[in-house]
Image: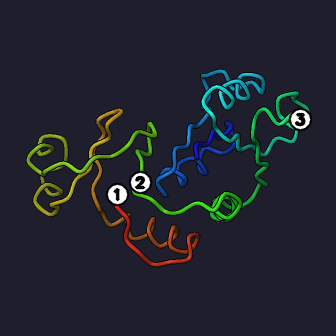
Amino acid sequence: MKFLCDAMLGALAKWLRAAGHDARYAREGTDVSDAHLVRVAMKEGRVLLTSDRGFLERKAIRDGEAALLLVPHAPVEKQLRLVVERFGLERRPSRCMECNGELEAVPSGAVLNLVPPKVAEARESFFRCEGCGRVFWYGSHWARIGARLDRVFGRSSKVGA
């Protein structure tokens, strides 16, 4: 399942990515009009996630040509739980928080020049985004991210970057 989050749901898009789900985000500086977002969702087979009830007036939404879920203004954890429960999502290995690309495990030697020296000394596992090349690793922040995902998905398991 793939998602398209409107401009008001950038944090939700990042948390869906952390949970391993393909979540595009309509950002400032791009066409974020309702009509454009509906076209993108239809073309790419994405569920449009929005807090804007105005989308319900779009013909493609009314006719069922495009899937939409209205997400209330709420803390991001509550929004994420709503999407997870509505679509029966499972937790997967994380995606890139920047570009939504898939992450691949890479040996530490392949990223030594891309991470701070102390990180290279302290960590053995690294992941590189196949889309933008950004490098990730299990840092101190991962415990907080994992704990939130565990609360939402209702289990306590460590799933890859």
Count neighbours of disc 2 (C-alpha within 10 A) and say few if under 14, some if 14 to 19, many if 20 or more: many
Give the residue at mark 1.
161
| Horizontal arrangement in the rendering, residue 126 relative to residue 61 (left or right) | left
Q: Residues within 10 Å of mark 3 (few under 14, many from 20)?
A: few
Q: Quadrant of residue 26?
A: top right
Q: Is the C-beta separation of discs 1 and 2 under 8 Å?
A: yes
Q: Nearer the viewer, residue 111 or 87?
A: 87
Q: CA distance from mark 1 to mark 3?
A: 38 Å
Mark 1 or 3, which is nearer the eye?
A: 3
Q: Position of residue 87 (x, y in %)?
A: 67, 57
Residue 84 place in picture, x, y as percent: 63, 61
Secondary element type, mark 2 = loop
How is this picture coloured? rainbow
Give the side of residue 62 with respect to residue 161, left or right. Answer: right
Q: Which mark is residue 62?
A: 3
- Residue found 8% across the figure and 47% down from its top: 109
Q: Earlier in the sequence, mark 1 or mark 3?
A: 3
In what element is the residue under mark 1?
A: loop
Judge from the rendering whether residue 20 lies leftward or rightward of residue 133; answer left or right: right
**Which residue is the site of mark 2?**
94
Report x, y in % for residue 95: 42, 48
- Label 3 or label 2, whichever comes before in sequence order: 3
The one nearer the camera, 41 or 125, is 41
- The number of callouts visible is 3
What is the three-letter code of the residue carrying label 2? Ser
- Give the Cα separation between the discs numbered 3 and 2: 33 Å
